[in-house]
Image (cartoon, helix red, strand yellow):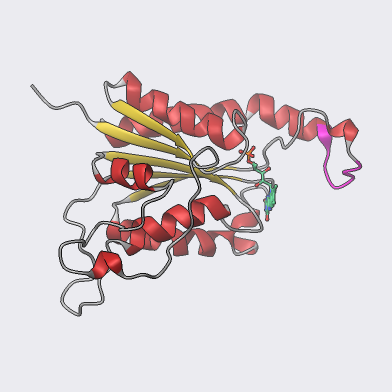
Amino acid sequence: MAEVKKIVAVNASPRTGWNTDRLVREAEKGAQDIGCETHYFNLYKLEQYTGCRSCFGCMLEGHEGHCVVKDGLTPVLDAIRESDGLIIGTPNYFSEPTAAFRALFERLVFQYLTYERERVSSSTRKIPVLFIMTSNAPLHYYDRAGYTEIIDRVCGPIETHIGPVTRLIASDTLQVNDYSRYKWTYFDAEHKKERHEKVFPQDLLQANETAKRLFG
Ligand SMILES: Cc1cc2nc3c(=O)[nH]c(=O)nc-3n(C[C@H](O)[C@H](O)[C@H](O)COP(=O)(O)O)c2cc1C
């Protein structure tokens, strides 16, 4: 009998139950629907942690592929190392993934990176990765505002050290339930609401179906 695949789902948004989290959860559900075992982490609910501390412990013999720092991110890094697939979602904060995403990214990737001419990575197996980003900005803004390039810079090292990345962008998201409480003249509340009701469900469906395709 084939072994049950283990999929790690990571929410790098501080808002539980909002856009990013719902997409991560839906992708996780897609994986569960096809029989995968999943493990969900909310990066904002972990014990204290930091990004890479540049201790180079992971580059010492016997430790390669293992971040030697022990903190709140350790269970996440361990789970990803043992997994057959990764779902990771982040909102766009000032054109970039969140600080929490960044901390995990630094620790996750650097533990596999080598400074050897002969090989760039110590990782011996690759797993499919679903990278989800949500943003206020609409999709057509991504190239113009440099978002695509920033995502490339994140996804490149993930491809090298973790595995092939599939991107899912959910853009022009609903940021709050009641826009009338804020003086946000920049946004058309009706448009945001309509988009949330009509387009966001399609994004959720895409998250579910992409997970099924990637982890099946
Ligand atoms: C600190 C902060 C910075 C943000 N910067 C951007 C930005 O540069 N571009 C953008 O399109 N949206 C930006 N947003 C909006 C979020 O990316 C968007 O609302 C996202 O869908 C929120 O995800 P969530 O619903 O999972 O919290 C920002 C939001 C916050 C709180």
In the displayed structure image, the side of residue 155 where residue 83 appears, left or right: left
- Image height of 144 relative to 178, above or below: below
Dominant secondary-structure state across the stretch colored magenta: loop
Q: Position of residue 152 (x, y in %)?
A: 46, 61
Q: Position of residue 181 (x, y in %)?
A: 89, 33
Q: Is residue 72 left or right of residue 121?
A: right
Q: Position of residue 168 (x, y in %)?
A: 48, 43
Which region is colored magenta? Answer: 183-189
Residue sitting at x 30%, y 61%: 111
Question: Going 42% across and 63% down the picture, which residue do you hit?
Answer: 52
Is residue 184 located in the magenta-colored stretch of the structure?
yes
Which residue is farthest bottom?
117
Q: Is residue 203 visible?
A: no
Residue at point 41%, 32% (across, down): 40
User: Is residue 147 rendered magenta in the image?
Assistant: no
Q: Toward the viewer: 178 or 41?
A: 41
Does residue 79 sit above or below 4 in this rendering? below
Q: Quadrant of the C terminus?
A: top left
Quadrant, the N terminus? top left
Can the viewer see residue 163 in this picture?
yes
